[in-house]
């Protein structure tokens, strides 16, 4: 499933972020001096106005007949989107390596490990909490043991006898695409590959294998016909993450990283939990699920008109694609219910500026990292 649009810039990680996080608007008179400002605090009046706008655009709901159409024909709407825009709509997400070092080569993964070690309060074998200062608009909890960051070389092997049905085939643990890889990444909702190809171009780890899926067959065709597509390092396939009857082409417990970039928001809220549950089962112990998606009261939500609301905070665009706007608490519930532990759950509030037109645009995104608990010593 394609990522919702328009996408934004990287999230705020204060002094840990290399490219962004250095511009803070202390003087409102200087708002048009830069294209974007970080960690923008909202006034009570602004937050109240945003809530009123959402209440206003939610009063008139899309009729049930049309709602059924948007769900049943969701793949058609996304296929049409990609037939129109092909690979010219989204930009490659090179910012991902700043926000998610887990996707970069091993030296950056080691850097992330060091970052966790620096923030440890004490040497204890169990998970624990550690929060950054109150000045940040973020909530960071280091609940996973630092050993979870060593999964590239120390992940317990997948049981050899594990098999998983895929259509009419029995895929054994040593016979699936990328079975010989030592580090496996899956992107769900890959679109035309704006995340996949930067990973393949940047991460030259010989043990890396990247899986990517989208339920738009048009998007997958564009990925597979891209000159950068390398079947020896990547496997692209059509998949609906809401289809409980269709398996992923990898065994349970075989993935190191699962990426969800502006994709979870594109499905019906009632189906989100089961989708995350299924994905969670694919992760190795210590594996990570990475998400970036729309936050409540983002500019895109406030721009919807009456008659475009499907249900609470869930809307349909003019082209038939849909989008949901999350709170941190909602995402935390989805991931923890699936058995994952919080590493990061932050709000990125940014003020984007069109200096030519003297316009300001307030964006709200949420960025999450959740890990699968390590196996206990008795397991």
Image: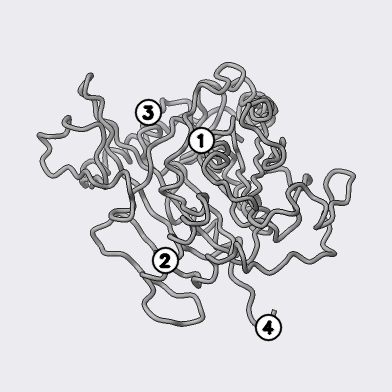
Disc on the earlier residue, 4 or 1: 1
Task: Please say whether residue 344 is visible from this viewpoint.
Answer: yes
Q: Is residue 115 left or right of residue 237?
A: left
Judging by the rendered image, the residue that carries numbered circle 3 is: 303
Q: Is residue 118 above or below residue 84?
A: below
Disc on the earlier residue, 2 or 3: 2
Mark 3 and mark 4: span between their CA atoms? 53 Å
Cβ–Cβ under 8 Å for marks 2 and 4: no
- Mark 1: few, some, or many residues within 10 Å (few <14, many ≥20)? many
Disc on the earlier residue, 3 or 4: 3
In the foreground, 179 or 274? 179
Mark 2 and mark 4: span between their CA atoms? 28 Å
Seen at 65% across and 33% down, the residue is 229
Judging by the rendered image, the residue that carries numbered circle 2 is: 114
Comparing marks 2 and 4, which lies closer to the viewer?
Answer: 2
Say which quadrant the N terminus sits in.
top right
- Mark 3: few, some, or many residues within 10 Å (few <14, many ≥20)? few
Comparing marks 1 and 2, which lies closer to the viewer?
Answer: 2
What percent of the width, then of the height, locates residue 377? 64, 82
Disc on the earlier residue, 2 or 4: 2
Cβ–Cβ under 8 Å for marks 2 and 3: no
What percent of the width, then of the height, locates residue 91? 47, 29
Say which quadrant the C terminus sits in.
bottom right
Mark 2 and mark 3: span between their CA atoms? 42 Å
Instruction: Check the image and name the residue furthest to the top.
Output: 84
- Could you say which disc has been placed on residue 378 in the image? 4
């Amino acid at each position: 499933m394609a990522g919702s649009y328009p996408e934004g810039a990287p999230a705020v990680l204060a002094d840990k972020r290399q490219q962004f996080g250095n511009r803070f608007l202390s003087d409102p008179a200087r708002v048009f001096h830069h294209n974007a400002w970080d960690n923008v605090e909202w006034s009570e009046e602004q937050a109240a106005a945003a809530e009123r706008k959402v209440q206003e655009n939610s009063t008139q709901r899309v009729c049930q007949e049309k709602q059924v159409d948007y769900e049943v024909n969701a793949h058609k709407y996304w296929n049409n989107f990609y037939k129109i825009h092909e690979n010219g709509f989204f930009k490659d997400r090179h910012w991902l390596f700043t926000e998610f070092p887990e996707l970069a080569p091993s030296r950056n993964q080691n850097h992330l490990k060091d970052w966790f070690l620096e923030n440890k309060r004490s040497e204890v074998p169990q998970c624990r909490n550690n929060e950054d200062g109150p000045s940040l608009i973020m909530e960071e909890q280091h609940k996973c043991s630092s050993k979870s960051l060593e999964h590239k070389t120390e992940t317990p092997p997948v049981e050899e006898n594990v098999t998983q049905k895929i259509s009419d085939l029995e895929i054994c643990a040593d016979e699936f695409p990328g079975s010989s890889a030592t580090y496996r990444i899956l992107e769900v909702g890959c679109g035309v590959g704006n995340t996949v190809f930067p990973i393949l171009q940047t991460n030259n780890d010989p043990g890396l294998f990247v899986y990517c899926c989208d339920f738009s067959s048009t998007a997958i065709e564009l990925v597979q016909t891209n000159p950068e597509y390398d079947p020896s390092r990547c496997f692209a396939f059509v998949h609906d993450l809401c289809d409980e009857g269709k398996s992923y082409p990898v065994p349970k417990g075989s993935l190191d990283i699962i990426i969800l970039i502006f994709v979870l928001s594109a499905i019906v809220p009632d189906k989100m939990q089961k989708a995350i549950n299924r994905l969670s089962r694919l992760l190795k112990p210590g594996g990570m699920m990475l998400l970036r998606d729309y936050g409540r009261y983002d500019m895109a939500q406030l721009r919807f008109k009456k008659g475009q609301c499907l249900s609470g905070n869930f809307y349909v665009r003019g082209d038939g694609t849909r989008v949901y706007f999350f709170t941190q608490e909602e995402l935390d519930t989805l991931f923890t219910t699936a058995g994952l532990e919080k590493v990061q759950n932050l709000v990125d509030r940014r003020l984007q500026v069109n200096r030519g037109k003297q316009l300001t645009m307030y964006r709200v995104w949420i960025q999450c990292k959740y890990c699968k608990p390590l196996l206990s010593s008795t397991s």
